[in-house]
Each structure stands twice: as C-alpha cells, then as structure tokens.
Image (cartoon, grey):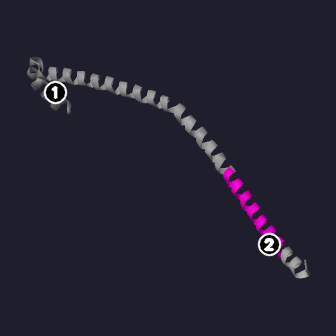
C-alpha cells in the first residue's frame, strides 16, 4: 500500500468515525426523547386510572341528585295540586271579597 492509499484510507476512517459519532448522538437524543415519552405515558396511565376510579363517585352523586330532583318535583306537583284544589274550593271563592278588602285595608 502506498502513501496515497494510506492517506485515503485514513480520511475514510475519519469520515466514518464522524458519521458514527453523529449517528450515536442521534441515537442518544432519540433514546432520551423515548424516555420522556415513556414518562408521559406513565403519567397519563396514572391519570386515567384515577379518573376511572372517580367516575363511579360522580355517577353516584348524579344518581342521588336525580333522585332528589324527582322527589322535589313530586313534592312541588303535590303542593300545586293542593293549591289548585284550595283555590277551586267553595270556601276560597266565598272568602275572596274578604281577602280583597283586607288586602286593600292592609296595603297588600
């Protein structure tokens, strides 16, 4: 091997070493990025698990609230019916002038 071939081979080796160093740097950067993404996935998995545990509590609260609303609506309907029955009664109609007079007299 003559000097020119040796110099040529050394230049190729140097170039290949630079390319290898660059590839190793890229691999390292990609591994670091992969590690960060793995960490984010773990965080998302924990967050998802916590939310799944919380969902039954929310459903229970909603169910209890819905039951309470139905009970209040039933109570309100009962009171409305009683008021209508009272206003339709004979005694309510007979005492209407007295209530009107008292309303004027008292100022209501």
Q: Residue at x 24, y 24 (%)?
A: 77
Q: Which residue is mark 1?
A: 102
Q: Nearer the viewer, residue 24 or 39?
A: 24
Chain part drawn in magenta: 11-34
The Cα atoms of the two marked residues, 1 and 2, are separated by 109 Å
User: Does the magenta segment cover residue 30?
Assistant: yes
Q: Which residue is mark 2?
A: 15
Q: Dividing the image into 4 quarters, which one contains the N terminus?
A: bottom right
In the rendered image, the vertical position of residue 14 relative to residue 42, given as above or below = below
Q: Secondary structure at mark 1?
A: helix
Could you tell me which quadrant the C terminus lies in?
Answer: top left
Which residue shows up at 86% across the image and 74% down it? 10
Question: Per the image, is 21 magenta?
Answer: yes
Residue 58 placement (x, y as % from top left): 47, 31
The residue under the point 61% across, 45% down is 41
Instruction: Name the foreground residue: 5 vs 29.
Output: 5
- Quadrant in the rendering for residue 46: top right
Q: Nearer the viewer, residue 51 or 82?
A: 51
């Amino acid at each position: 091997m003559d000097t020119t071939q040796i110099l040529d081979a050394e230049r190729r080796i140097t170039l290949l070493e630079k390319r290898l160093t660059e590839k190793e740097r890229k691999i390292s950067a990609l591994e670091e990025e992969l590690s960060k993404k793995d960490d984010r996935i773990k965080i998302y998995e924990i967050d998802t698990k916590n939310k799944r545990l919380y969902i039954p509590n929310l459903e229970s609260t909603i169910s209890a609230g819905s039951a309470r609303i139905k009970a209040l609506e039933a109570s309100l309907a009962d009171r409305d019916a009683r008021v209508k029955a009272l206003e339709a009664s004979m005694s309510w109609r007979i005492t209407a002038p007295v209530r009107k007079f008292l309303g004027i007299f008292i100022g209501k």
